[in-house]
Image: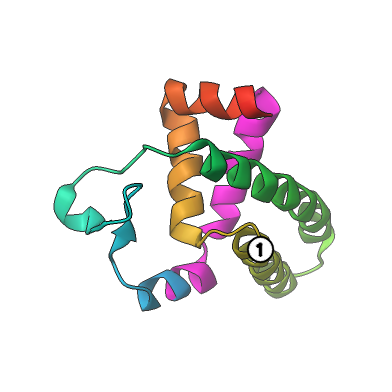
Amino acid sequence: MNKLFVSIAASLALLATGPVMAQESQQSPETANTDGGYSDPASSGTQDIHFNDAQLKQFIEAQEGINGIRDEFMAKIEASDSQQKAQQLQMEANDEMVGVIEDAGFDVPTYNSIATAYNSDPSVRNRVDALM
């Protein structure tokens, strides 16, 4: 469980860079609720942390792929000989992580919402851990 927590934190750090943020800003601020409706998270001031088991299983699948990418690219980034090369590698890792997230059936904001909930809400963490 500790390894997953650290992994999610590292993945979120990589996903929080510019290319992903630019992608998010192009998307509508509306997010799907679990009941199929939409809400504007900026206006509600709270994050919807009611995820169904299917979403949590998708999250686990995405996280497994992200772990491999993170491990591969962290070694490359640490071995890079310049800041520019490290930034290029980070952008490549970001692109691959976004691909994994999308292949699992998520968009980046939804994945990030679940990852944040995993890190901050023990009930979400317990549910994810039980599904692993």
Residue 65 position, x and y percent, is: 74, 52
Magenta stretch: includes residue 27: no
What's the image's color scheme? rainbow
Q: Quadrant of residue 59?
A: top right
Residue type, numbered disc 1: Asp
Question: In this view of the protein, which residue sits in the foreground, 35 or 93?
Answer: 35
Specify the segment rendered in magenta. 1-22
Q: Is residue 6 above or below residue 78?
A: above
The answer to which of 29 and 67 lies nearer the viewer is: 29
Name the residue rendered at 43%, 47% in the picture: 113
Q: Which residue is mark 1?
A: 103
Q: Position of residue 56 (x, y in %)?
A: 55, 39
Q: Residue at x 66, y 50 (%)?
A: 62
Q: Is residue 17 magenta?
A: yes
Q: Quadrant of residue 42?
A: bottom left
The quadrant of the picture occupied by the C terminus is top right
Taking the image as drawn, is residue 51 in sight?
yes
Relative height, residue 125 to residue 94 (above, below)? above
Residue 10 appearing in the image: no
Query: At numbered mark 1, what does the secondary structure look like: helix, strand or loop?
Result: helix
Q: Is residue 123 left or right of residue 86?
A: left
Q: Residue furthest bottom?
A: 26
